[in-house]
Amino acid sequence: MILVSQDAEGIRMAALEVFELSLQSKSIERRIQNIRPDDLEQIVKIIPERKLSPGYYEFLMYLLWLEGQMEAGCNFALNADEADGLRAVQQARHEFDREHPACGNCGTPRASVRARRCESCMREF
């Protein structure tokens, strides 16, 4: 049995997956709005399947909350699992930022490094 809080690589993978899904959130919302509310089968098809156990995402949400509190100036005595988890989140964020650099015009993350146009402001790269 894997202890999620001690699996830094799994936490990094969960964070990267969540960051990637954030790019698709508007598209997913639009697609869901075009489906009848009682058509759960179609809604389930649209929502991306998670790759990891739910425990990874739950611990990730805790780490993101903890990170936000620390950025706001709160001081915590971290245990090793939290420190390693925060480092894994930071690694995933750097990886995401390398693959999805921000648009120089509006700051929106690009769909990929190879994107020729910002999907938000339509600026050509």
Image (spheres, helix red, strand yellow):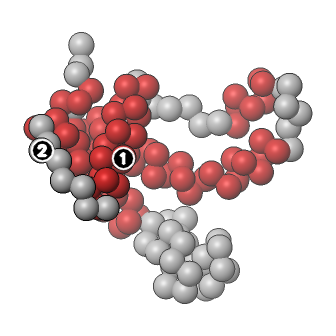
Q: Is residue 66 above or below residue 125?
A: above
The percent position of residue 42, horizontal first and vertical second, equals 78, 30
Badge 2 crowding class, 10 Å Cα cut-off, few under 14, some 14 to 19, many 20 or more, is: few
Total marks shown come to 2
Position of 30 with respect to 111 (left or right) is right
Residue 65 is marked as: 1
On the image, numbered disc 2 is attached to which residue? 77
Q: Is residue 98 visible?
A: yes
Which residue occupies the extreme top position in the image?
Answer: 1
State the residue at coordinates (70%, 37%): 46
Which residue occupies the extreme front position in the image?
Answer: 74
Q: Nearer the viewer, residue 57 or 31?
A: 57
Which residue occupies the extreme right position in the image?
Answer: 36
Q: Nearer the viewer, residue 84 or 104?
A: 84
Badge 1 crowding class, 10 Å Cα cut-off, few under 14, some 14 to 19, many 20 or more, is: few
Position of 14 with respect to 28 (left or right) is left
Name the amino acid, label 2.
Ala
Q: CA distance from mark 1 to mark 2?
A: 15 Å
State the residue at coordinates (45%, 52%): 19
Q: Quadrant of the N terminus?
A: top left
State the residue at coordinates (66%, 80%): 121
The percent position of residue 109, horizontal first and vertical second, equals 50, 69
Find numbered disc 2 in the image and state the secondary structure of the residue it sits on.
loop
Name the amino acid, label 1.
Trp
Picture quadrant where residue 99 is located:
bottom left
